[in-house]
Image: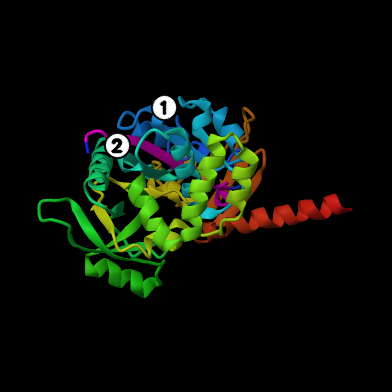
């Protein structure tokens, strides 16, 4: 529909515990330069979607605790477009809060004429022009069909770390959109290999597009508590009663949008991505975005290496002249920062968050003495 009012929301609420010791509660991974030497993940995400959606129509959804840091990050966004969720309520809660904000701010606009694109701040996406073209088609599909729309990533390996989308036939032969048969949980290795061989399974990108009217209608059927909360929160926000809005939000279940809506919804379409994509979820993602040296090492910062191969090495100690020396290591991650030093096997980087939990327990024990 030509008169649709388009918005984009970049989800940026996680603290990125798997990127300790660079990430912290005060400086989460979306504010780090991980895949680029010059831009943070959040800056990259914003740059990708603009000018397809103008800056004043882009929201960043994050936690209330992180909102000040994001507002101070120098992004070319209105300060009140950084939406701080009052507490953790997973992606279903996040997108309900966003929907309520959009309703409250656009009360004069029919929800049938509002299109929302849901993006994330922790993806590395190559070929931004192709990305924007896919997003444009996804928004058009959301505006043309009474369906929710997602983007599926053609898998390049049998990865057990991603959820999958099982795609059906195209909605119409001339369209780019496929019907979605179902969403599949993260598989084991055998299932992932079977998905890859089948040819109609795609990685779930976590990007979604919908007309607000369709989102609300499907949510009313799939998760009535979220549907009711959106309207009640929007009403409270219109009245300036933020305490009531937060109270209502706190009553929501802690559940993902996949469980709350997408897995139950019979009206979901998928567009196939034709751009390069990677989920920047842990330190091993740097191997897929940064240049390796002649020994297979990814090196960021000042290092002296002896007989070291296939390692990920990051030195951000922030002190000039501080060199980190590494001798005789293979397939290891070494990260040095003012917050701490990490040494981990590359195949154990998913467990780095356990270090963060141990650190918190130690701090709690010290404070209780």
Q: Residue furthest bottom?
A: 190
Q: Which residues are magenta?
A: 2-19
Query: Residue 262: image x %, image y %?
Result: 38, 60
Residue name at image x 52 percent, y 41 percent: 235
Question: What is the quadrant of residue 3 in the picture?
Answer: top left
| Residue 343 higher or lower than 104, as above or below | below
362 left or right of 355 in image: right
Looking at the picture, how far across and down is residue 314, in whole percent?
54, 42
Q: Is residue 311 magenta?
A: no
Res 266 label:
none
**Residue 46 is drawn in which quadrant?**
top left
Residue 41 image position (x, y, % from top left): 46, 38
Q: Inspect the magenta stretch and tell me whether residue 8 lies in it.
A: yes
Q: Which mark is residue 56?
A: 1
Rendering coords of residue 106 (x, y %): 42, 34
Residue at image position (45%, 61%) is 223
Can I make out residue 102 in this image?
Answer: yes
Distance Cα–Cα, label 2 vs label 1 = 20 Å
Provide the secondary structure element on which disc 2 rests: helix
Q: 352 or 167: which is nearer to us?
A: 167
Question: Quadrant where the N terminus lies?
Answer: top left
């Amino acid at each position: 529909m030509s008169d649709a009012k388009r918005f984009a929301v970049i989800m940026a609420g996680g603290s990125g515990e798997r990127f300790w010791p660079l990430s912290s509660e005060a400086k989460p991974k979306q504010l780090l330069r991980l895949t680029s030497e010059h831009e943070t993940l959040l800056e990259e995400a914003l740059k990708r979607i603009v000018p397809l959606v103008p800056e004043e129509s882009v929201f960043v959804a994050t936690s209330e605790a992180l909102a000040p840091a994001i507002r101070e990050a120098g992004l070319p966004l209105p300060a009140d477009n950084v939406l701080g969720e009052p507490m953790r309520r997973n992606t279903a809660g996040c997108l309900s809060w966003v929907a309520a904000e959009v309703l409250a701010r656009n009360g004069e606009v029919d929800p049938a004429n509002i299109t929302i694109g849901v993006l994330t701040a922790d993806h590395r996406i190559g070929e931004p022009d192709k990305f924007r073209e896919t997003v444009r088609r996804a928004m058009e599909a959301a505006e043309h069909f009474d369906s929710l729309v997602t983007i599926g990533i053609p898998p390049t390996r049998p990865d057990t770390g991603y959820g999958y989308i099982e795609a059906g036939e195209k909605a119409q032969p001339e369209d780019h959109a496929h019907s979605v048969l179902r969403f599949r949980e993260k598989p084991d290795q055998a299932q992932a290999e079977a998905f890859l061989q089948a040819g109609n399974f795609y990685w779930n990108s976590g990007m979604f597009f919908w007309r607000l009217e369709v989102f609300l209608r499907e949510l009313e059927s799939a998760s009535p508590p979220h549907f009711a909360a959106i309207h009640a929160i929007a009403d409270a926000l219109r009245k300036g009663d933020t305490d009531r809005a937060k109270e209502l939000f706190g009553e929501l279940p802690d559940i993902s949008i996949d469980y709350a809506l997408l897995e139950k919804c019979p009206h979901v379409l998928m567009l196939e991505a034709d751009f390069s994509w990677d989920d920047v979820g842990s330190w091993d993602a740097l191997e897929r975005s940064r240049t390796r040296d002649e020994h297979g090492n990814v090196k960021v910062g000042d290092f002296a290496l002896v007989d070291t191969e296939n390692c990920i090495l990051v030195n951000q100690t922030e002190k000039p002249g501080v060199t980190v020396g590494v001798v005789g290591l293979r397939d290891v991650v070494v990260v040095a920062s003012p917050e701490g030093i990490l040494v981990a096997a590359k195949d154990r980087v998913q467990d780095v968050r356990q270090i963060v939990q141990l650190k918190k327990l130690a701090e709690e024990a010290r404070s209780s003495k």
